[in-house]
Amino acid sequence: MNSYEKAVLESIITKGANASQIAQMKGLDVSGIFSAIESLKEKGAVEAQAVETTLYELSAEGEHCVGAGLPEENVTRKAAEKNGCPLDALSDAERKIGLSWAIKKGLVGISEGRVKATAKGLEMIEKGYTLREKLKAKEHNDELVKRGLLVQKKVKDVVVRITPAGKKMLAEEPKEAGTGAIDKLTHKDIVSGGWKGKLFKAYNVSAAGEMPQYGRENILRRFRKRISEIFTEMGFEEMEGGLVESAFWNFDALFQPQDHPARELADTFYLKGPARIKLSKDAPISKVREVHLEKWGGHWSLDEAEKAILRTHTTAVSSRKLSELNVPQGKFFAIGRIFRNEAIDYKHLAEFHQVEGIIAWDKANFRNLLWVLREFYRKLGFEKILFKPSYFPYTEPSLEIHAYFKEKKMWVELGGAGIFREEVCYPLFGRYPVLAWGLSLERPLMIMLGIEDIRAFYRNDLRELEKYKEGTLTWLFE
Amino acid sequence: MAVLRANANDLIQLCNNEINEKEIASLLDSIGAPLDGKEDGTLLVEVTPNRPDYLAVEGIAYSLLCFVGKRPKIPEEISQSGLVVEAGKVASRPYIAALVAKDVSMGEAAIEGLMQFQEKIHDTFGRKRKKIAIGMHDLDTVEGKKIRYYAGTGNEKFVPLFESEEMSAKEVLLRTEKGKEFAHIIQREYPIVADEKGVMSFPPILNSERTKVRSGTRNIFVDITGTDRKSVENAACIIAMALSMRGGKIQSVDVKYDKETIRLPNMRRKSQEFSFDAVNSILGAQFSRKDICALLHRTGVDVVDERGRTVAYYPPWRVDIFGNSDIAEDVAIAYGYNNFEPEKPELFTVGKDTQGVRKLLRELMLSLGYSEINTFVLSNEREEYQKLGLDIDTPCVKIANPLTTDNTMLRTSLVPSMLRTIVQNKKYRLPLRLFEIGEVVHADGKTDWHLCAAIYGEEAGLESISGMMKLLLDRFGMEYEAEGFSMPFMIDGRCARVRMKNGSALIGEVHPEILERFGLEYPVAIVEVGIIKGF
């Protein structure tokens, strides 16, 4: 227990108190007290509740009045002179504010152009002005607030109450060491042999010690790491790509016609700078153009294909990989950020992750695809999965993967997959087929952990994420 | 993905009561139009963009009936209506298709369905009316046999649908709701469809009140205009199928272009050559020819052997069949995806990740007691630059079409998101030790990985963070040199640029003015390193 924690427990041993009061009482800083309360909460020693309290602070004018006196006080002081004080001897400000308050409060009266202190006024001067005392003490007073001398301020505070465990902790906190008994065993004690023949002060061995702080993995990154491990265990090689892509690799190479709705502004982030990404001369531009013209008709524009975008799926990484591949077969995966021009809410983000995979192999087939997906999800802990027909412009057959969440008793769609079309495979790779999938990273984790709001993964509230203890994910590593 | 709202009773009636409501969900899966949900009496059906025919409830009924072996007869040969469309030069939407349906029984559900189809096809397949727009008319109000399609001047007058006064096409764009919504499509010329009496429609904006379809309308004339001939003619085909499913007799219309005349709609089945072996090899299956023919029959496709060539004849309104893989998908859907036995691929490869240094750095940071954070790459100039006292015009990747002012650029440094994360956590136990290994994107669009680490609390200082960095670089055997540097958000004299062999790092104590701006009450020491090759 450190000195702040001790201060908190001592202050609240009899009744609850606010953090700000404790700080004031003990002459310690509030943020230190806050952090002590957090730590005591962890140990179960206190219960804390956030509240909003009202504090009063001096305004600039209030500050002035504390030193120089309130205007009515000053007027009364002048009026207490013998014969009072002529009206025109008062300054403008004194006449306007001080005089009217002084009259209102019955401290002075006016006769024959002179201001004279009343008995009440004289008494005030003798005994001191209580309103000023209140102002000095920043005590709540309606008049002072109304006159703008005190300013109301709402502050967040914490009300703390001690628990029985806390009382026990405090009681067991070592008092001054008894004469001769050793408290903290020191280096000096040991080398000097000074401990010999002495007793050791008994500690409370059942007390919770001080919890260490440690480096905690981000839950989404941890999940990502496990997925990466699963794919490498299954013999996949990782591939990576940039976040900024040309429309060519993101759409055209994947047989998405240039007037496809997904390419519209509402779904895709286009860039102002760089607005265009020049395709390298190794890119299979003419082959892709040919297949578009042949199958979609209309025209195909290089200009459109070179538009710079934020990749909308990691499949852009796959299309690049296929075109660069100089071996006839391979298994690859990628986990990366993707972007959609969507309004953000608890279900949607403009930026999230996708888990991508391809198998390029002459003998690959639909049943292989089903096997790999089933095996992947089995390793993630899903025993039941279902495949449903779906559509993507670049795969045929196409499917959706739905997984069953035992605890929630529900089916959830986790991703899409299929066999890349000949129109995709031949221009990029010269071979067919290629199995491919794009899976959600965030969604299964949200459901496993009961996270309702996808933004939690990016908010990085350490306390919020602490709820999801490593223990709850042990199955991931079995 | 579009969702069709189908009236369940109407769908069952269209299926001649061959299918009950219980069977519908699993059958919808089997025809590739999965059920998304149910709202009293309405089925929500997912429609993928390759099946515009499913945007019409009649198209779904057709496929369901095929699947249960009761394929409806949609005549391939149709009689002529005698109507001719003379298509002039309309550069902005050069193509038109038309058809006539007689003796259609249009109940409420049918009219609702047709309107929904029109709306959905406009929104999806029709690219918000730009590519395709459909107009439906009461044939009995059409005067004469000759219909003209031409580019007008905008002064053509007519009473638009649901209006009571006459307006010119130009006025329609200014005064009607649809006109305002779609005015951007009209450029220079005003496409007009007119009979002998005058304007029938002003595609893709509005039809005329005169020729509108009313309850009790039995005979319908449909015009479809657009920018792509295939799409326009295909839409005509889908509408013809839908009206035919409603008992209508479809009749053709001759469309006369400058150099050719075509008779539409073309209801002849389309053909695609394929190979049984290719289908089996795609699916990894050993279906017999008979199996494949039977499965395809359930999807409405007939297989014919034409002198050794295997040809699939499929409904003319389908647009998703290009080759073997499309035929294979039809076979797989009819067989049921979940009835396939998954098979382990016998391809041996060695697994490998590319995380390398990033993985080691991450482990090292965690072992040093730093907690990992994960923040967005998308941000805005205000948060990334202005708040740190940097030039708001610092070069970076900028979004051309931002949806919000929050996401207008990509970050070039991890420092601002680190400071925001500290703010998020300042109320917790101190000190905070945080790190992120994340992407930054340079103004030229190149993505790089950076490591950023920070300490927040009484003990945060240049010494503690530079000690940490020294440890990192030492672990990787990297030599470095630090020199004084000035950054608007760091304290002068406590900020250094660190140079390594082919990279650099920034290290320092954040200036209290910035701390104040962020509402932070303890010092922050921070380091950002580019993770480069050779690390």
Image (tube, helix red, strand yellow):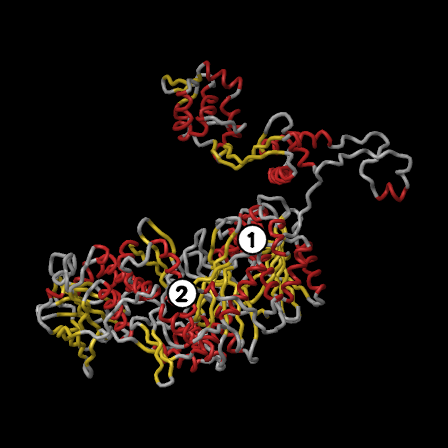
Above or below, A364 relative to B487: below
Judging depth in this view, the residue of A256 and A414 nearest the camera is: A414
Mark 2 nearby-residue class (10 Å; few <14, some 14–19, many ≥20): some
- Placement of B533 over or under A150, stated as above or below: below
Residue B181 visible in the displayed image: yes
- Quarter of image, res B304: bottom left
User: Callout 1, which amino acid?
Assistant: Leu
Give the CA distance from mark 1 to mark 2. Answer: 27 Å
Residue B214: x and y in percent read: 15, 58
Tell me where residue B429 appears, x and y as whole percent.
62, 44
Image side of residue A260 versus residue B190, left or right: right
Q: Do the numbered discs 1 and 2 sit on residues whose CB atoms are within 8 Å? A: no
Q: Of helix, strand and loop, which one carries label 1?
A: helix
Closer to us: A158 or A319: A319
Give the residue type at disc 2.
Answer: Ala
Task: Looking at the picture, tell me which residue is in the foreground, A254 or B136.
Answer: B136
- Output the chain of dot 1: B
Tell me the residue that label 1 is attached to: B419
Residue holding disc 2: B400
Residue at disc 2, secondary structure = loop
The chain that hosts pointer 2 is B
